[in-house]
Image: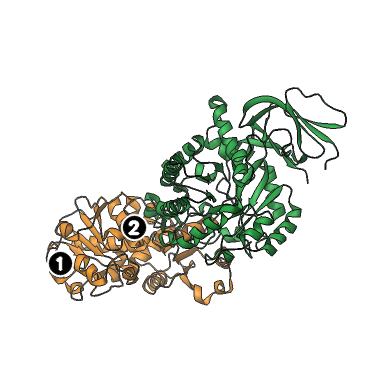
Chain colours: A orange, B green
Amino acid sequence: MKNLISIDDLTKGEILSIVKRAETHIKNELQVAGSLGGSTVVTLFFEESTRTRMSFEMAARKLSLGVLSFSKSTSSMTKGESLRDTIATFESFGVNALIVRHSSAGVPRQISEWTDLAIINAGDGAHSHPSQALLDIVAFRSAIKGDIPNLGSLARNNPDDFSGVKIGIVGDILHSRVARSVARAFSKLGGEVVLCGPPTLLPNFWQEFQLVTDLDSVISELDLVMPLRLQLERASGGFIPSLSEYRHRYGLTIDRIKKIKESAVILHPGPMNRGVEIDSLVPSDPRALVNFQVRVGVPTRMAILEHCLEGEYKNE
Amino acid sequence: MNEVSLLIKGGTLVDSVGLRRGDIAISTQGLVSQCENNIEIASNQRVIDASGLYVSPGFIDLHTHLREPGNNEAETILSGTRKAALGGFTSVVAMPNTNPSVDCTSMVHEIKALAKSAVINVEIASAITADRKGGSLVNMKAMADLGVVMFTDDGSGVQDSSLMDKALSYAGELGVVIAQHLETNSISKNGLANLGPISQRLGIPGIAAASEEIMLARDLILLKNKSAKYHAQHISTSGSLEIVEIAKQRGLNFTCEVTPHHLFLDDALVEQFNPIYKVNPPLRGLSDIKDMRRGVLESTIDAIATDHAPHTLDAKERSFSEAPCGIESLDIALGIILKAFGLDNKDEFDADKLIKVIDALTIKPRNIISKRPKTSLLDIGASGDLAIFSLEEKKEVPKVALSPYRGMDFMGKVIYTICGGKVVVENGVGNW
């Protein structure tokens, strides 16, 4: 059993091993049913989410795992049960892994201190969302390897090493667990990460990655452009003057994407605010892999479940 | 009244006068009756052998949360004062953020009644505003007349500048302390940890140093030309120290305190996402810690106050955002402080440093809340409140403790605590 709480828990080798396993699942080349049969996972979502939860549950079912679904609103936690007691309850059921989402950073880590069950982080506050970062790597590698129909081959790089690849994450970096995980994951594979957004939404004290406020000054250098969903309440919170000002400066508009390299890829972790961080027509641009990204979610999470439940597995 | 008088013999006295050999006799009235070298043992006198030990005035904590009434599961006046006594404290100032808050004379009476269970002196602090809500001033004079020494909305700062201005004006003639929890809510908002590289890397909402510094600067501007005794609680940032330095250099009369944890623990610890490290003000960076230590040694910072803030296990096992703020340290404060200043290391022992630190735990806090400042607390006629400690004995914090100090050990152990001539801690164990 292994935890996956943050990208920091994985070596470069483990990241590649998980994404390659996911790629084999995409090709449906594996007879997967049965190998983990008898194990049960719980999706323990203290914060609502549809896509991530369903994606994990679908992945678990494809692996013939038992799935229990917990949501805070319908649980005893509304009766005042503590987090620790909730975990103890599931532990006594004899489940094998807890897939945890919580609005507070650090909860999966806290839970891992209380139990030997495998803990898989499905997003905690602004801290970490490792499965999203891994599926983004799978999507990006598909583009590099020319696996995506209608895209044409972008083959120019070693898919196992992102040296020379420049990744721009654009938007509300400060509040984004996706940004933190994607930045870590791509840089672990050798990529150069640029975090771009308004000064009020950049982590100005954190100097691990290059911080840029002027998207137009870097957009033509990027091989991967990832606009983040902008929480609409950021404007009322004073982080940005208005949504239209944000679109003017950071939105992937039809005009702005003309500056993006022909060979580059646009990924969006979703759900999209069309007309804010991304214009309506942009997801249809051949460089945008938004739909493909959603498709790789299930196979990537299958690979994550296998990684955490088996501890290791053999590729090829 | 004590049945026998006490003689503390053979110890090294440490207070603002300096470090010296000396014996102390305490009368049956509980007052210091002699303080000199080689006092002869009288008949019917209990002798405490303090050879190899340091004898200082009892410690005074300006900032203690005793939780009673309202959260007796976390702490009571009895349990809290016992911890304090084990730590060498003979007086604590009980913070008013109980449930209900201490904000009226009837609550003062209630605390006084409850404090009959205390094993050391409990001084009472009231809120500045009704129910600590920041709306209207409490009946300060009526409570001052009952002996309330301090007014603070601790746990929250008084946000309304105009109301704070009035509180300082009104309190001026009463001789009481107006103490401020320095936090500007519009800046700290939903912050949980020090705003800096660590919180930003971890995605934990940050609390900017400016939250503390803006309120400190504001209060000092309001304090100008007023006679109120203003006390800044738990300062924690380099910027706050700088503001204090400048204001004191310009002759403004006020005091401030720092906690043991802001002298010792840094914000890298929140990487563990364990709410035992959640405290307000948050643990800050290493350079802040360095400046806090310098502030004590340069006497810019007047007092070291624990901000002892116990919570139940259940409360501290919530998520980092939901768990309450607070660290306990009454019983181990001395060891933490000695370690913070390198005084736990025999080879680096520095008498001047020890004196500074002990002053910040004794005479300086006493003079902040006292209407008649003293120059020594070991004078004849002073209350027989003493802490007798060893620098060569270790105090260990259990690995399972609900404490950021769990698993650590600290040189510096309180062997005796004497309060009003009564031996409340003997050989490191409570006499209760």
Pick the front one: B102 or A296: B102
Amino acid type of the residue tagged 1 in the rendering: Ile
The answer to whether residue B332 shows anywhere in this view is: no
The N terminus of chain B lies in quadrant: top right
Could you classify mark 1 by the number of other residues whose Cα lies within 10 Å: few (under 14), some (14-19), or many (20 or more)? many
**Dot 2 falls on which chain?**
A
Disc nearer the start of the sequence (2/1): 2
Q: Position of residue B417 (x, y in %)?
A: 72, 39
Dot 2 and dot 1 within a common chain: yes
- Disc ID at residue A230: none
Quarter of the view holding residue A173? bottom left
Q: Position of residue B149 (x, y in %)?
A: 63, 52
Q: Is residue B171 above or below residue B379?
A: below
Return the residue found at the far right: B43
Amino acid type of the residue tagged 2 in the rendering: Arg
Residue at horizontal 24%, vertical 63%? A226
Per the image, the residue denoted by label 2 is A180
Quarter of the view holding residue A131? bottom left
